[in-house]
Image: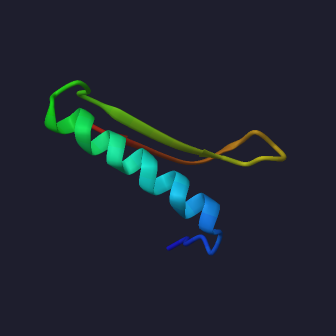
Amino acid sequence: MMMSADDQVKAYIKKIMSQLSKWTQSSKISKLVVVITDKDSDEHVERWQFV
């Protein structure tokens, strides 16, 4: 499991999760795709799709 020690990253993810919660509760989104991309190679390292 990857975890960030950077407080700015944690705050950013918390903000995103709060918005996603609002969208899912109000049925404004039906699918979410999360992609982690390597900064140097631009290669997709991880990809998750939630329906």
Taking the spot 54% from the left edge, 42% from the top edge, the residue there is 35
Q: Nearer the viewer, residue 36 or 18?
A: 18
Q: Number of callouts in the render?
A: 0
Residue 51 appears in view: no
Image quarter in which the C terminus is found: top left
The residue lying furthest to the right in this view is 40
Taking the spot 73% from the left edge, 48% from the top edge, the residue there is 38
Residue 24 in the image, given as x and y percentages of width and height: 21, 36
The residue lying furthest to the left in this view is 26
- Specify the color scheme: rainbow
In terms of image quadrants, where is residue 50?
top left
In the figure, is residue 50 to the left or right of 47? left
The residue lying furthest to the top in this view is 28
**Compared with residue 39, is residue 10 higher up or lower down, i.e. above or below?**
below
Residue 37 appears in view: yes
Residue 43 in the image, given as x and y percentages of width and height: 71, 42
**Compared with residue 47, is residue 9 higher up or lower down, i.e. above or below?**
below
Taking the spot 60% from the left edge, 70% from the top edge, the residue there is 4
**Compared with residue 8, is residue 31 higher up or lower down, i.e. above or below?**
above
In the figure, is residue 43 to the left or right of 16? right
Taking the spot 61% from the left edge, 68% from the top edge, the residue there is 7
**Compared with residue 31, is residue 10 higher up or lower down, i.e. above or below?**
below
